């Protein structure tokens, strides 16, 4: 389970009520900004070599971190990401810079299976954001951010979305599908398997 925008600190980490049977991994931002957490079932971690402190790698404090899992069951990286929120050009440039930084830590799909849990804070399709005032679709405004993700991850590394159609964010003016899970496994793997992701609506 990946959680974004946690506003966590070392103190909240010590006082957190943890998910039973899971091991937590944290990358803090500040009390008022960013922060990502990852919870992995202990029974799942037992399929791999014992996780060392250096196997949890913050890629950008409070924004992105990666867990390396290696062992008899293969090679798996889990990346959890929370991109900067906002719509002005400076913030959009910051988001694209974070995506570029993350891409530098992505290995080819021939070497490792990667699952990436992303709070984009932008939408990738025109119909991923719906205006409450007039019922129009407004996802086109995020086209440059969506194109950057496509080039950096889909084209270069073969990432595709683990499709789920539900709205994941609601505010006073719109409903949006901001949160996604992506993986770099071959689409041919879906011939005899069902891959899906689950998100809880956040407000």
Image (cartoon, rainbow, N blue to C red):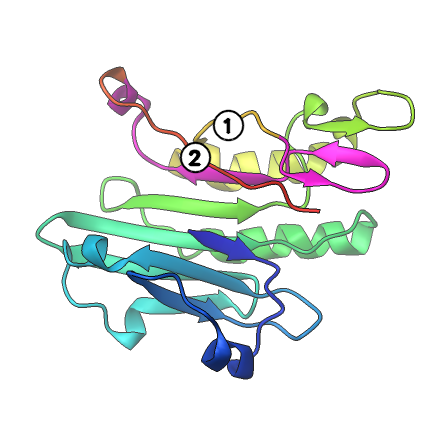
Magenta span includes 186: yes
Residue at figure coordinates x 39%, y 30% from the top left:
196
Residue 16 x/y as whole percent: 48, 73
| Residue 171 vertical position relative to residue 17 in the rendered view, above or below | above
Total of numbered circles in the picture? Answer: 2
Circle 2 crowding by C-alpha within 10 Å: few under 14, some 14–19, many from 20? few
Q: Which residue, given by chain and number where applicable, does mark 2 sit on?
A: 197
At a point 37% along the width and 44% down the height, the residue shown is: 115
Q: Position of residue 96 (x, y in %)?
A: 64, 50
The residue nearer to you, when weighing 129 against 159, is 129
Q: Nearer the viewer, residue 89 or 85?
A: 85
Circle 1 Cα neighbour tier, 10 Å, few/some/many (<14 / 14–19 / ≥20):
some
Assess whether residue 133 is covered by the magenta stretch. Answer: no
Provide the secondary structure element on which disc 1 rests. Answer: loop
Q: Are marks 2 and 1 in contact (CB under 8 Å)?
A: yes
Q: Residue at x 70, y 22 (%)?
A: 127
Left or right of 126 in this view: 186: left
Residue 91 lies left or right of residue 165; in this view the side is right
Question: Residue 120 bears which disc, if any?
Answer: none
Q: In the image as oriented, which residue stretches furthest toward the right?
A: 133
Q: Disc 2 on helix, strand or loop?
A: loop
**What x and y, as percent, mark residue 59?**
47, 65
| Circle 1 residue | 164
- The percent position of residue 153, horizontal first and vertical second, equals 47, 40
- Along the line of sight, the residue nearer the viewer: 121 or 166: 166
Q: Which residues are magenta?
A: 167-190
Q: CA distance from mark 2 to mark 1?
A: 6 Å
Q: Is residue 71 above or below residue 56?
A: above
Q: Is residue 59 above or below residue 12?
A: above
Nearest to N terminus: mark 2 or mark 1: 1
Residue located at (59% from left, 57% from top): 98
């Amino acid at each position: 389970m990946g959680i974004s925008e946690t506003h966590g600190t070392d103190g909240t980490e010590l006082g957190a009520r943890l998910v039973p049977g899971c091991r937590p991994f944290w990358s803090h931002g500040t009390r008022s900004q960013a922060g990502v957490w990852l919870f992995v079932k202990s029974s799942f971690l037992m399929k791999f070599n014992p996780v060392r402190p250096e196997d949890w790698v913050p890629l950008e404090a409070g924004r992105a971190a990666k867990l390396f899992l290696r062992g008899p069951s293969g090679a798996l990286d889990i990346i959890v990401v929370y991109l900067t929120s906002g719509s002005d050009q400076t913030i959009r440039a910051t988001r694209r810079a974070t995506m570029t930084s993350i891409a530098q830590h992505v290995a080819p799909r021939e070497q490792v299976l990667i699952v990436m849990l992303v709070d984009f804070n932008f939408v990738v399709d025109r119909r991923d954001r719906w205006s409450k005032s007039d019922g129009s679709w407004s996802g086109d405004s995020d086209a440059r951010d969506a194109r950057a993700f496509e080039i950096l991850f889909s084209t270069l590394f073969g990432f595709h979305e683990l499709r789920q159609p539900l709205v994941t964010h609601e505010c006073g003016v719109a409903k949006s599908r901001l949160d996604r899970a992506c993986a770099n496994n071959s689409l041919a793997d879906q011939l005899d398997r069902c891959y899906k992701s689950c998100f809880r609506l956040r407000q």
